[in-house]
Image (tube, grey):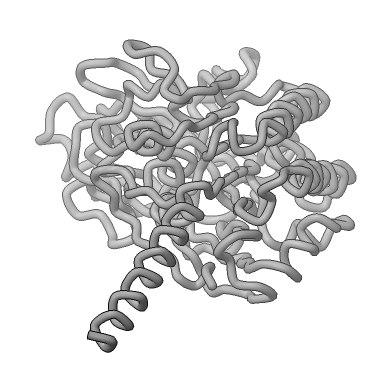
Amino acid sequence: MRRLARRGVVLSALIAALLSASAARSESTVVLLLFDGFSGPMTELADTPALDRMRREGTWSHGLVPAFPSISLINGVTVSTGCWPEHHGIVTNLFLDPERGRYDHDSDADWLIGCEHLHQAAERQGVRAAAIGWYGAYSGSRGPLASWVGEEVHCGPRLEDSARDDARRSERIAELLARGPGGPRLILGYFCGPDGAAHFRGLDGNELPGEVARADGIVGRILEAIEARPDAGEVTLLVTTDHGMREISHLVNIRRILRSEGIPARPVSSGTTSFLYFEDGADVDAAADALARYDEFDVLRRDALPDYAHLGTGPRVGQLVVSAKPPYFIEDTEMWPSYLRWLGDYGPKFIWARFSLRATHGYPPDVEGMDGIVYAWGRGVAKGKRAGRIRNVDLHPTAAHLLGIEPGAPVDGSLNRDLLK
């Protein structure tokens, strides 16, 4: 009887411990911040005391692996959903959908063809979320998809506009954190970051160090807000990006090339890729053969994509994908200044373009410069550790684990234990 009694005491203690751990887990809070276009080498351009602290006290990597093409919306949505583009449906910044028409940098969650944003998965499981400037915060048919939402993903045309937008978002997140355990347990925030300065002023431009320092200041402000909470020890902060950046020099004039080769395709281009849509599939083979003669880009077939391109074979992907090689990039002529658009039909095939754009992204994920940053700090995170390369598709399930919920359904990513204790 005494042995049974002792076993009963031990069992009761074990159950109490498990219940206590479960209660602590249920009170955890996760803050995920994404700064556009932030690569690891940028951290060397300015003093970054907040990121330095996260390195000392948490886990970090300058090897965030983006999805292809390594441009903004496709990768922001990949981070948010934990799904590859072939499953969430945002296959690039500009594409054609046979039913919905032209997609153009739209953050409306109704464009998803599958998967759930992280805030949707949290809300579905009873965890209130905030999505501040975040992907899929709104649905055109269902309204806000989080308990707290901010403006849509947006950066002003000038650096000072982006700085104003970022400052407003950081203060909003700090205010939500000040609510303590009664506020959101998941906070997602998008920031313009150093992307604009790198694009238009270059990686060696005078503006980029200031933009890096400004991003670090936002991280510092959020760290202060976390530490002011009574439950600061239950909060995890994740800082990441959507892609890296590298210098470029020449524009691929894809419309002129198609015209000169007699290829009847509609190009839709962004970053370093152009999706070519054909009305008659019989024209694809000859077009692929003609374009394969150019050394400045690769030609990918939708039905035979390389392993790194998780784009799928759906109609949103052009039958051919022209993928520029560094230092070349591609933009549709309607994105050019109006006085230069005639070059799309009659200008040279390759145009020196550093007068308009100095650096960009969009190349395959293993191309130098495309990696981004991941910093993790706080509850559940290993301390003083440098991690290896981390797929951005794994951040969603890792954040869900730290929050104590199941990831979205479905999800392609997996828990990254390299970040955890």
Tell me where residue 9 sits by quadrant: bottom left
- Where does the C terminus fall, quadrant-wise? bottom right
Residue 294's x, y, as percent?
40, 52
From where the camera sits, is residue 128 visible? yes
Q: Is residue 156 left or right of residue 419?
A: right
Q: Relative to 247, is 73 above or below?
A: above
Residue 313's x, y, as percent?
18, 43
Query: Which of 396 and 158 lies nearest the eye of the viewer?
Result: 396
- Residue shown at the point (55%, 33%) measured from the top left: 184
Query: Which of 90 and 213 lies nearest the eye of the viewer?
Result: 213
- Residue shown at the point (63%, 75%) measured from the top left: 386
Query: Which of 31 and 316 lies nearest the eye of the viewer?
Result: 31
- Residue shown at the point (72%, 68%) measured from the top left: 57
Tell me where residue 211 sits by quadrant: top right
Q: Is residue 133 left or right of residue 170?
A: left
Residue 292's x, y, as percent?
32, 53
Q: Relative to 25, is 17 above or below?
A: below
Extreme left residue here?
282
Extreme front residue here?
1
- Residue shown at the point (28%, 86%) measured from the top left: 2
Extreme bottom residue here?
3
Residue 63's x, y, as percent?
56, 66
From where the camera sits, is residue 260 visible? no
Q: Is residue 145 left or right of residue 54?
A: left
